[in-house]
Image: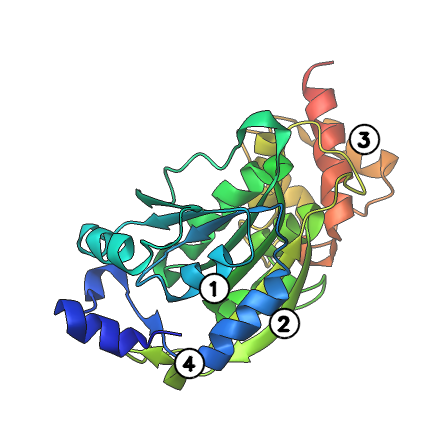
Amino acid sequence: MQNPRAILAKYQIRPLKRLGQSFLSDPNIIRKIIEVSDIRRDETVVEIGAGLGVMTALMARRAERVIALEIDRALIPVLHEELKKYDNVEILHVDALKYEFRTRGGATLKVVGNIPYNISSQILFRLLEARDHISSMVLMFQREVAERLVAGPGSKTYGILSVLVRLYTDPAIVFNVSPQCFYPRPKVESAVVRMDIPEKPLIGVDDDAFLLTVVRSAFSKRRKTLMNNLKASSRIGLRHDALLQVLDSLGIDPARRAETLAPEDFARLSNALSRRQFT
């Protein structure tokens, strides 16, 4: 396995602060990510943030195809040179936020990556939108964000991302990663999260965009009741009596706060509110 520092020195490249670049340099952590990803010979993997191609090379030995995404133009020739012996690797100079995570022929993807922490939530939203085309995700997050993703109802860290991730995936923090495992060292702790996406969700959601509206509205002011937050939302657009009827039909106390509702409760609530809007 190539040493990231040696590759940087070889090509006289310095990590870019504006992109939040910290290259994973611990070979044991890289191997653990590969193992946790459980890549099989017939699978296509999309790697977010291919960087110097160290992890890309290991995945290429296991997968049928690896699509390596990298936003830093300076690293593209490095990737081509370091990965030239792997004919199953496609290197793309692209922003992961603009990449279309959908495949031809109905095949599903595995997504792996050490994603930029400053846009991790945005990337995760994009991935969840494309979940029908993804079987699992193994991603590195700032530890604080990782803990939010797996948080349950009643927790101080339970919020919008928690609801969506737990509703659409089966998430778990598989291991934590120390700053000393990166070059340059970040100022925060990290964690690797695996999110398996079931073929059939426990509860179907009628309208993903509306669900996001409902969840965001419900959490808009954490100290206020669910009823008050929903009533204040112009995008939901229902009056007190109509909201009360919907909540009562679901057995949800309007005086509850958003953080007490399970992800499944939000799915049912979103579906009921959406249907009520058009009646």
Pair 1/2: label in front: 1
Amino acid type of the residue tagged 3 in the rendering: Gln
Pair 4/3: label in front: 4
Alpha carbon of mark 2 to alpha carbon of mark 3: how far? 42 Å
Between residue 224 and residue 128, name the one nearer to us.
Answer: 128
Alpha carbon of mark 3 to alpha carbon of mark 1: how far? 55 Å
Pair 2/3: label in front: 2
Amino acid type of the residue tagged 4 in the rendering: Asp
Q: Residue at x 32, y 61 (%)?
A: 51
Label for residue 58? 1
Instruction: Please name the residue that numbered disc 4 is placed on.
Output: 26
Amino acid type of the residue tagged 1 in the rendering: Leu
Whether residue 277 is visible to the viewer of this picture, yes or no, is: yes
Q: Position of residue 109 (x, y in %)?
A: 57, 43
Q: Quadrant of residue 96?
A: top left
Q: Quadrant of the C terminus?
A: top right
Instruction: Please name the residue that numbered disc 2 is placed on.
Output: 174
Label 3: which secondary element? helix
